[in-house]
Image (cartoon, helix red, strand yellow):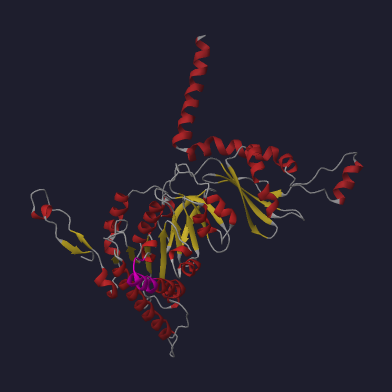
Amino acid sequence: MSDTIRVLLPALAVAVVLLVVRRRVPVLFWWLVGYPVVALRVLVSYRTTMDACGLTVPASAIRRATARMVGRQAAPVPPRRSLPRPTGSGLVMRLRMAAGQAPEDFAASADRLRHAWGAHAVHVRPTKPGRLELRLVGWDVLAEVRPARRHLVTDPLRLPLALREDGQWHVRDFRTVPHELILGATQSGKSVYLRNLVCGLARQPVVLVGIDCKWGVELAPFAARLSALADTPDRANDLLDVLLDEMEARFRLIGLGGGVGPDAVLTSDVWGLPEAVRPVPVVVVVDEVAELFLAANKDDEKRRDAMVTKLIRLAQLGRAAGIYLEVCGQRFGSELGKGATMLRAQLTGRVCHRVNDESSANMALADISPEAALAATSIPAERPGVAIVGDSSGGWSRVRSPRLTLDDAAAVCRATSDLAPELPRLDSFRPVVAAESAGPSSPASTAPAARPVTE
């Protein structure tokens, strides 16, 4: 009996340790146990699984003739594959499709492959004609998302904002997708996505402009890093005028860059200008865009029409001038008023969190992909931060942002306040922040003085 206990105790201890590791450090568990098991299962059952899923083709004439010579029947041929290569959340195989096969055939069988190989999910991505990538995910990577440590050093205007369900990061690239629409109901995680965006931009030499007509409750905590903040519709209208003046001045600079001379540069946007004269990029964050569209009287309607026209001009022409828009809201559609649909058409990127009705999801994603809109309606309320990300190319994926508290985001903005570039046109809109208290007994602790962010 004692010998049996001596044998069982170490095995039980190892099992308990593996269970703890699987729960607390799923990546380590995958490398130790998950990948060897799944890879062996894939290698052993690859041919039979492909045949059962209808992903094989008949053998060639030479192979059939050779099989008849030895009295056998040639088996169907599966696609050629590479060895399963491990990743941080699963494994990847590259397949060479046979004649007559298409990536859609494998995408339709992804769920059957998932069950056959015991993976959490299987994703299919074409790489080039005749070849595709089969990515197996070992566990639910969206259950707990941590910041991307290896992506801390990012290229200008490229930010890893959310983890995709296939284990890769969704990277927000402003130069590729200049403008974006972010939709989501209350408590859907929209603010968390916005915090990650602001913190990522705060670490770069980028002019951050905020328009928050809810008296600044969402963007005021980031005032230390903002170059301009408008918290009322009147201030927002004036700020948009200044941004249009800045855009016009930048277009003049681009035109001068293509002038006559040995140092002349032919370009159609600011990124073609020499770095010495290139203006800094400007990112305009509009929180709760519906507040800009609502009107109670004729004066409000005139102001609304003017602001919508200015936003449309920024969306149409701002990319070439290095001015980018991030528009957030709970709903966005034609019912907001004149020009709303035209503005939405200029916002190439779409991020849709959990919404309260199907029409809201259709507003954001139906013109990209009906399947994406359907997926947005199935986001559970107990998983805030999960969203559907798409763009005008028709591609979409399910993502989740790392959890980031408001205090942590505000601390990042305070720590990076010295990175705020100078833009003289925005000086009158620069928010002021209270000076830090000097101590419990100091006068500053009871009556904090206001100081400009640039100090």
Residue at figure coordinates x 90%, y 40% from the top left: 70
**Is residue 365 one of those drawn in magenta?**
no
**Is residue 302 one of those drawn in magenta?**
yes
Report x, y in % for residue 122: 61, 45
Report x, y in % for residue 374: 56, 51
Q: Is residue 116 left or right of residue 61?
A: left
Report the predominant secondary structure element of the magenta stretch. helix
Which residue is situated farthest in the bottom direction here? 260
Residue 322 appears in view: no
Residue at figure coordinates x 53%, y 40% from the top left: 139
Report x, y in % for residue 235: 29, 69
Give the quadrant of the C terminus: bottom left
Q: Which residues are magenta?
A: 295-307
Question: Vertically, is 275 above or below 288?
Answer: below
Residue at figure coordinates x 46%, y 63% from the top left: 335
Residue at figure coordinates x 29%, y 65% from the top left: 232
In this view of the protein, which residue sits in the foreground, 206 or 368? 368
